[in-house]
Image (cartoon, helix red, strand yellow):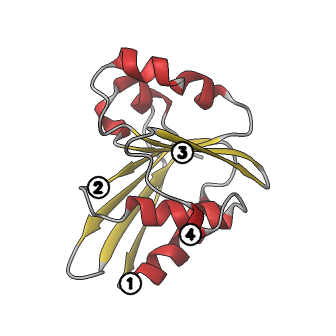
């Protein structure tokens, strides 16, 4: 796997701050990408996706929910398709293949946002960027974005 060449850190103290930072991250990582979203349960990954999708013109915040049980949600944005995957419940590369990850990742204009992608070598090999989130106190979060140019 190639090394990440760029990085940026953020800190937010509120849900509104996380949503705003998501727009900034969406701009930084513009273009087709596979992005792994890291963080423990409750870190705010889905909140980040809500702001990201709104920034891409793919969905309003209230339309975005976690794909924990459906595994993937698909949206159409101004610049192409956006996939939001939650791989928490998957156990094997075979299940990942059946989900159609390779096809999503190869779609020319797609952005693929993957929660729990670090569980799978195939996802990590295709990853163009990572956003790591840590829950601090209350609504405070730290975010670390790493990407390749």
The CA span between labels 2 and 1 is 17 Å
Q: Look at discs 4 and 1 and give the one toward the viewer.
A: 4
> Residue 78 at what x, y percent from top left?
79, 55
- The residue wearing badge 4 is 62
Select label 3 or label 1 by which is in front: 1
Label 2 environment density (alpha carbons within 10 Å; few <14, some 14–19, many ≥20): some
Earlier residue among tags 2 and 1: 1
In the displayed structure image, the side of residue 103 where residue 141 appears, left or right: left
The residue carrying mark 1 is 14
Number of other residues with Cα within 10 Å of mark 1, as a class: few under 14, some 14 to 19, many 20 or more:
few
**Disc 4 to disc 1, C-alpha distance:** 17 Å
* Residue where numbered disc 2 is placed: 39
Asked whether the beta carbons under mark 2 and mark 1 sit within 8 Å of each other, the answer is no
Instruction: Tell me which numbered mark, 3 or 2, is placed earlier along the sequence.
Output: 2
- Labels 3, 2: front one: 2
Real-space Cα separation, disc 3 to disc 1, in angstroms: 28 Å
Mark-to-mark CA distance, 3 and 4? 31 Å
Which residue ends up furthest to the left in the rendered image?
A: 137
Which comes before the other along the chain, label 4 or label 2?
2
Res 53 quadrant in image: bottom right
Query: On the image, which quarter does residue 11 sit in?
Result: bottom left
């Amino acid at each position: 796997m190639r090394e990440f060449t760029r990085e940026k850190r953020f800190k937010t103290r509120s849900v509104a701050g996380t949503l705003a930072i998501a727009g900034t991250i969406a701009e930084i990582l513009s273009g087709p990408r596979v992005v792994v979203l890291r963080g423990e349960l409750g870190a705010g990954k889905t909140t980040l996706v809500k702001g990201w999708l709104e920034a891409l013109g793919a969905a309003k915040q209230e339309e975005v929910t976690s794909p924990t049980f459906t595994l993937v949600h698909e949206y159409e944005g101004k610049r192409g398709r956006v996939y939001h995957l939650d791989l928490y419940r998957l156990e094997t590369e075979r299940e990942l293949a059946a989900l159609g990850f390779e096809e999503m990742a190869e779609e020319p204009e797609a952005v693929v946002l993957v929660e729990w992608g670090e569980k799978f070598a195939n996802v990590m090999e295709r990853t163009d960027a990572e956003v790591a989130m840590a829950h601090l106190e209350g609504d405070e979060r730290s975010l670390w974005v790493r990407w390749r140019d």
